[in-house]
Image (cartoon, grey):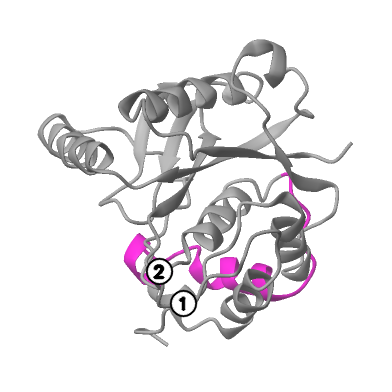
């Protein structure tokens, strides 16, 4: 399974919610569209928001910023909460699945999980490091098979697993007073500074705008939130 390439998930709340519910996530929480990043449109997002997921095109500007950011953090250091759940991504095209695992895993104090695939995975993964968690996901047939099934649903033409994919999912979460960017393709999580559960959506929206500003000619960005179900 390590070398297997999967069909990517679509950034579609209906598909993503089916995936989460299949893995045992309570329907009290769901993925919802974020229609815009200005305050007027953010006001329409149900509260509370537990995570924000950004889908963006992987560009040269992104890669350059990623490298520069990593060098700065390695030079200056950063504080990371011991309670943060972060994992590496090793299976091709599973960034959407990793983003949703990050969203749930960092909010288990609020999200009810039925006995099932996700709960067992998080129980096994909680004491592992980021790399071992990624390797554990790689061999987790329940989660990988759910990804395969839901990747075939959606509104767009389903790509083949071998088709090149230049879009990537990442997650923003609040943990212990800080806003974290969780990207399984990066060397480590990124602490973006103070936030609160109430301001996390607005603070994450500012970071999403920064991604967009680095690629001003690009329009293929999608933002969704993991939030309370209306």
Magenta region includes residue 222? no
Residue depicted at 37% across the width and 55% down the height: 166
In this view, the mark in front (1 or 2):
1
- Seen from the viewer's position, the closer of residues 24 and 128 is 24
In this picture, residue 169 sits left or right of residue 62: right
Q: Position of residue 188 (x, y in %)?
A: 30, 48
- Seen from the viewer's position, the closer of residues 186 and 78 is 186
Name the quadrant of the N terminus. Answer: bottom left
Q: Is residue 214 above or below residue 9?
A: above
Residue depicted at 46% across the width and 59% down the height: 95
What range of the chain is rendered magenta?
110-134
In this picture, residue 166 sits left or right of residue 61: right
Asked if the residue at tag 2 contacts the one at tag 1, i.e. Cβ–Cβ closer than 8 Å, the answer is no
The residue tagged 1 is 161
Q: Quick one: label 1, few (<14), some, or many (20+) residues within 10 Å?
A: some
Q: In the displayed orientation, state which residue is furthest to the top.
A: 40
Residue depicted at 36% across the width and 32% down the height: 191
């Amino acid at each position: 399974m390590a070398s297997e390439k999967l069909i990517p998930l679509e950034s579609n709340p209906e598909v993503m919610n089916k995936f989460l519910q299949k893995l045992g996530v309570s329907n009290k929480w769901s993925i919802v569209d974020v229609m815009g990043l200005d305050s007027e449109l953010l006001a329409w997002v149900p509260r509370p928001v537990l995570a924000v997921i950004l889908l963006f095109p992987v560009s040269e500007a992104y890669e350059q910023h990623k490298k520069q950011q990593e060098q700065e953090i390695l030079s200056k250091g950063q504080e990371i909460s011991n309670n943060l759940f972060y994992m590496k991504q090793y299976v091709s095209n599973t960034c959407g699945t990793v983003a949703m695992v990050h969203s749930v895993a960092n909010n288990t104090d609020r999200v009810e999980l039925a006995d099932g695939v996700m709960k067992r995975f998080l129980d096994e993964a909680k004491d592992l490091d980021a790399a071992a968690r990624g390797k554990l996901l790689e061999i987790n047939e329940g989660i990988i098979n759910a990804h395969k099934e839901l990747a075939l649903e959606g509104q767009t033409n389903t790509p083949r697993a071998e088709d090149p994919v230049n879009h990537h999912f990442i997650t923003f979460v609040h943990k212990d007073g800080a806003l974290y960017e969780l990207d399984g393709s990066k060397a480590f999580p990124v602490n973006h500074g103070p936030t609160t559960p109430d301001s996390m959506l607005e603070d994450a929206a500012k970071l999403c705008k920064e991604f967009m500003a680095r690629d001003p000619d690009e329009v293929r960005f999608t933002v969704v939130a993991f939030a309370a179900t209306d």
